[in-house]
């Protein structure tokens, strides 16, 4: 079960309540979480360009978070759609996150509220990884329970995942591959287990986070949710893409032997 802190509870209630508002426009939980994923990625990329990080932006000029904040009405709607199309053609993690992305929020006023009033008010990179990761995973679980948007995707109960990981007892030198990873629940539970049971130095943490956790998923939209779920928990990022869109049951199993 998710352990909800006061800040996590408030965040979940705010995001869930706004999803209920958007349901009036015909959005499912899946649509909503997908739009959150796009906007959170842009917001966190923007935060990395500011102190104390001062990194070069990974988002092309003119398609960043600030460009969305400056607009309203039809101009915001048009620019957001153009931004999704542009980033879907980018290489690496950006292209995977925004692959085939579409704006599902038909009302520009509601899109602006999601951008300016809900997401922009928080510094997401400064939040504890467990808090923001668990908040996002709570939305994924709610999406899986949604009979309209969650059909066809099975959200494995977290106690069951935890029991399986406890039996397997992974260690920092174990390479973990989930060939049907969904939104990454088994990989995240493994990450948590290793960090709880082993004292890792900085080099070991970097190697485990970026080299030892890998997954396959067949559905584009689920791949992006899994990647954001991992990123919010502090796993992957940059050029590291821990989840790949691929059929793990393809005819030539040797083609996936690099990970599995």
Image (tube, rainbow, N blue to C red):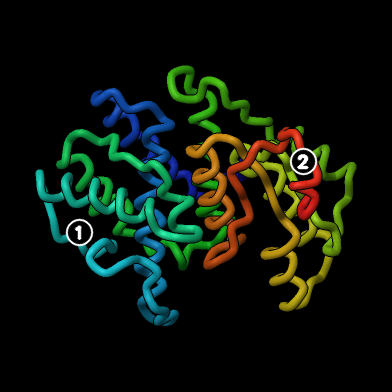
Residue at left offset 48%, top offset 22%: 146
Q: Quadrant of residue 218?
A: top right
Residue 137 x %, y %: 55, 42
- Left or right, 9 with respect to 14, comes to right
Helix, strand or loop at label 1? It is helix
- Foreground label between 2 and 1: 1
Residue 158 x %, y %: 69, 36
Residue 162 numbered tag: 2
Closest to the observer, 152 or 3: 152
Q: Residues within 10 Å of mark 1 (few under 14, many from 20)?
A: few
Mark 1, residue position: 69
Residue at left offset 63%, top offset 55%: 242
Q: Is residue 166 above or below residue 200?
A: above
Q: Residue furthest top?
A: 147
- Left or right, 231 with respect to 89, comes to right
Q: Residue furthest front?
A: 252
Residue 135 x %, y %: 50, 46
Q: Is residue 25 above or below residue 123?
A: above
Q: Residues within 10 Å of mark 2 (few under 14, many from 20)?
A: some
């Amino acid at each position: 079960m998710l352990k909800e802190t006061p800040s996590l509870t408030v965040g979940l209630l705010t995001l869930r309540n706004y999803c209920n508002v958007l349901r009036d426009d015909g959005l499912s939980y899946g649509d909503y979480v997908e739009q959150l994923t796009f906007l959170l990625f842009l917001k966190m990329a923007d935060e990395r360009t500011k102190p104390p990080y001062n990194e070069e932006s990974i988002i092309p000029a003119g398609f960043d978070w600030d460009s969305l904040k400056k607009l309203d009405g039809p101009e915001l709607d048009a620019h957001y759609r153009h931004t999704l199309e542009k980033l879907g053609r980018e290489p690496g993690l950006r292209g995977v996150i925004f692959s085939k992305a579409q704006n599902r929020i038909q009302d520009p006023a509601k899109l602006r509220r999601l951008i300016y009033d809900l997401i922009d008010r928080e510094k997401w990179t400064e939040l504890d990884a467990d808090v923001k990761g668990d908040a996002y995973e709570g939305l994924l679980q709610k999406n899986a329970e949604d009979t309209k948007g969650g059909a066809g995707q099975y959200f494995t109960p977290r106690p069951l995942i935890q029991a399986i990981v406890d039996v397997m007892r992974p260690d920092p030198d174990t390479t973990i591959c989930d060939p049907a990873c969904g939104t990454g629940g088994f990989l995240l539970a493994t990450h948590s287990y290793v960090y709880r049971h082993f004292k890792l130095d900085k080099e070991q943490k970097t190697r485990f986070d970026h080299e030892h956790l890998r997954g396959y998923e067949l559905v584009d939209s689920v791949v992006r949710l899994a990647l954001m779920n991992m990123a919010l928990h502090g796993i992957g990022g940059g050029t590291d893409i821990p989840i790949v869109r691929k059929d793990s049951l393809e005819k030539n199993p040797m083609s996936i032997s690099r990970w599995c």
